[in-house]
Image (cartoon, grey):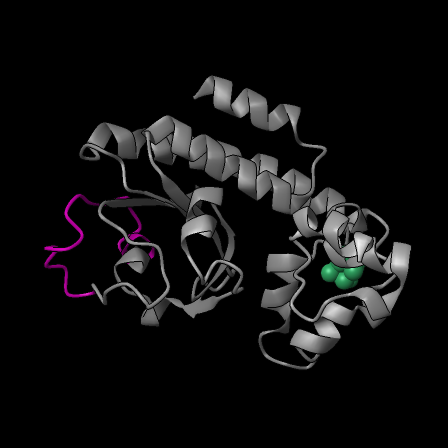
Amino acid sequence: MQEALRRLRENDGQSLKRMADLVIEEALELTGSKIGYFATLNKWEHLLTMIGWSKSAMAMCSMANKPIVYPVENTGLWGDCVRERKAVITNDYKNCARPTKKGIPEGHVAVKRHMNVPLMSGESIKGILGVGNRETEYTKEHAELLQAFANAAWPIIVEVKEREEKRSKCALQDVCPFFGRHIPIHDVMYRAYVMRFCDGDSRDCAISQVVQKRGFIKVPKDLYPNQTFRVTDILKR
Ligand code: SF4
């Protein structure tokens, strides 16, 4: 775990989105999992916002580009770790009898095993770190390791978040074609979209890269800020 935390600290100059991805990647490595996610919890501990999925989950899941805000009271089994304020292990998802189990939404990656922990800061829960689909069963030791890692990673994430808030913001923020197209600024989901897709840092934003090189007109309607892998092809057209 110390190695995982050292790698996180080495990368603390990255964007918040990238740091969330790194936390998930390290969680997969620590627990031998195939999929993972990271969600933050608001200060009243009633709204969860999904801010990152593992690459493997994104490749398998058609829902991965959706920034989703969940009232905790409406969450299924994965919200139990907030309600119970402790790690929850589900080694046989299909036959799990927990009353909160709601099943997997259409388009969602198949889950065989699942484990998640509340990300604690003192007595407060700040989010959830979840993993899934380990080949063999998750154990109490895996849960303790993931919990210790999540708690130790949170102060690093907070530092990155605070630094980003001080950093100068993307020059396109008031006219960003992504937000204008996908979500009006007064929409209740606007903050969730910003948190999921835009940290205000245009350096790793596909929308910004296309606008700066070819103008607004060249931004495809289906381009998301996190799809920088598409930029080279778009600029060739
Ligand atoms: S999504 Fe990209 S272009 Fe739009 S405001 Fe955020 S960083 Fe700027």
Residue 174 visible in the displayed image: no
| Ligand 1: image quarter | bottom right
Numbered-mark total:
0
- Rendered location of residue 215, percent (x, y): 89, 64
Identity of the residue drawn at 49% across and 18% down? 3
What main secondary structure does the magenta stretch of the protein show? loop
Which quarter of the figure is the N terminus placed in? Answer: top left
Asked whether, in this view, residue 36 is left or right of residue 6, the answer is left
Image coordinates of residue 161 in percent, x first then y, are 67, 46
Look at 65% across and 68% down and name the residue there: 222
Q: Quadrant of residue 83?
A: bottom left
Q: Nearer the viewer, residue 176 or 89?
A: 176
| Horizontal relation, residue 96 to residue 164: left or right | left
Q: Which residues are magenta?
A: 80-100
**Closest to the observer, 10 or 41:** 10
Q: Is residue 30 left or right of residue 87?
A: right
Residue 97 inside the magenta-drawn segment: yes
Which corner quadrant of the image does residue 77 belong to? bottom left
Q: Position of residue 87 (x, y in %)?
A: 28, 44
Image position of 147 (left or right of 112): right
Q: Which residue shows up at 40% across the image and 44% down it?
A: 36
Q: Residue at x 71, y 76 (%)?
A: 181
Q: Quadrant of the C terminus?
A: bottom right
**Direction top: furthest residue:** 3
Task: Tell whether position 28 is magenta.
Answer: no
Which quadrant holds residue 157? top right
